[in-house]
């Protein structure tokens, strides 16, 4: 679990996870597009994410596709979120989203 | 074969045989798979169905490949009308040896439509967490059932 928190403690790595969430199964080259990071830096960050099991890779021919693996994040949630809190937390989260959306639309 | 839509990976301190059993045998799936059980003869070409506790058929399809306790490929369709129309998906389950007496469990799902993706992306992390916690600690994190 240390590896997961360490991997998530970096804004560039969270950005890479966000990109995979938006479009799962990207190659290194695709992930490097429109990023102000060198290919080498992206590759290093992906290595740390893969080590923490937050990114899973699949080989397809000569390409390596990267997938966001939410299982470790799910396990963190399971550890600290009680069984009966889930509904209330979902309601709070929905309310926050709705209110912040309203503000943006004004 | 199309590009996988989702890839879920978990490392479990257990053996391939036990992970296979946790995925397939009814006394385990009753706990790890929200009360559901598989109905199949576990051989290539055999029909496969996932039956909920109340007897409803949640998913149906066919065993495409089976290599116990390493690899299972299923042709998969959710039987809810709005999901059924999205057609067939393909689910691959792989169990490999990993470091530290652990096994790596990978579930890959190739789906055609957004609704099935939404349905499976909610369930797979929970099922994998359940199997990991059941095999490693003997206890379950989640006991909730599919509605």
Image (cartoon, coloured by chain):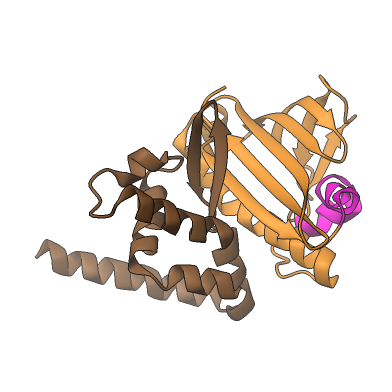
Chain colours: A brown, B orange
Q: Would you say residue A82 is visible in this rendering? A: no
Who's the residue at 37% across and 68% down the image? A94
Image quadrant assignment for residue B138: bottom right
Image quadrant assignment for residue B84: top right
Q: Is residue A47 above or below residue A33?
A: below
Q: From which residue to which does the magenta span run?
A: B15-32
What x and y, as percent, mark residue A39? 34, 48
What x and y, as percent, mark residue B31? 81, 59
Q: Nearer the viewer, residue B9 or A35?
A: A35
Q: Residue furthest left?
A: A106
What x and y, as percent, mark residue A58? 57, 38
Whether residue A97 sits left or right of residue B18 in the image: it is left
Q: Nearer the viewer, residue A33 or B125?
A: A33
Who's the residue at 85% across and 49% down the image? B16
* Residue B93 part of the magenta-drawn span: no
Whether residue B9 sits left or right of residue B65 in the image: it is left
Q: Is residue A98 above or below residue B89?
A: below
Q: Residue furthest front?
A: A40
Locate the N terminus of chain A and report the quarter of the image it occupies: bottom right
What x and y, as percent, mark residue B114? 45, 37
């Amino acid at each position: 679990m240390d590896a997961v928190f360490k991997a998530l403690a970096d804004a560039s790595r969270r950005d890479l996870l966000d990109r995979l969430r938006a479009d799962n199964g990207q190659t290194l080259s695709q992930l490097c597009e429109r990023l102000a990071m060198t290919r080498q830096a992206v590759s290093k960050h992906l290595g740390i994410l893969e080590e923490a099991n937050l990114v899973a890779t699949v080989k397809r021919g000569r390409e390596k596709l990267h997938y966001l693996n939410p299982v470790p994040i799910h396990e963190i949630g399971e550890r600290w979120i009680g069984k009966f809190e889930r509904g209330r937390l979902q309601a709070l989260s929905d309310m926050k989203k709705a209110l912040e959306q309203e503000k943006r639309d004004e | 074969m199309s590009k996988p839509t989702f890839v879920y990976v978990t490392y479990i301190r257990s053996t391939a045989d036990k992970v296979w059993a946790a995925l397939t045998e009814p006394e385990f799936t009753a706990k790890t798979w929200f009360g559901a059980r598989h109905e199949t003869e576990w051989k290539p070409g055999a029909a496969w169905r996932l039956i909920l506790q109340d007897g409803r058929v949640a998913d149906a399809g066919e065993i495409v490949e089976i290599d116990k306790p390493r690899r299972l490929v299923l042709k998969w369709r959710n039987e809810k009308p709005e999901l059924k129309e999205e057609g067939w998906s393909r689910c691959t389950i792989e169990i490999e040896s990993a470091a530290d007496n652990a096994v790596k469990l990978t579930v890959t799902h190739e789906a055609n439509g957004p609704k099935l993706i939404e349905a499976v992306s909610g369930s797979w992390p929970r099922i994998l967490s359940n199997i990991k916690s059941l095999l490693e600690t003997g206890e379950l994190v989640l006991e909730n059932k599919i509605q």
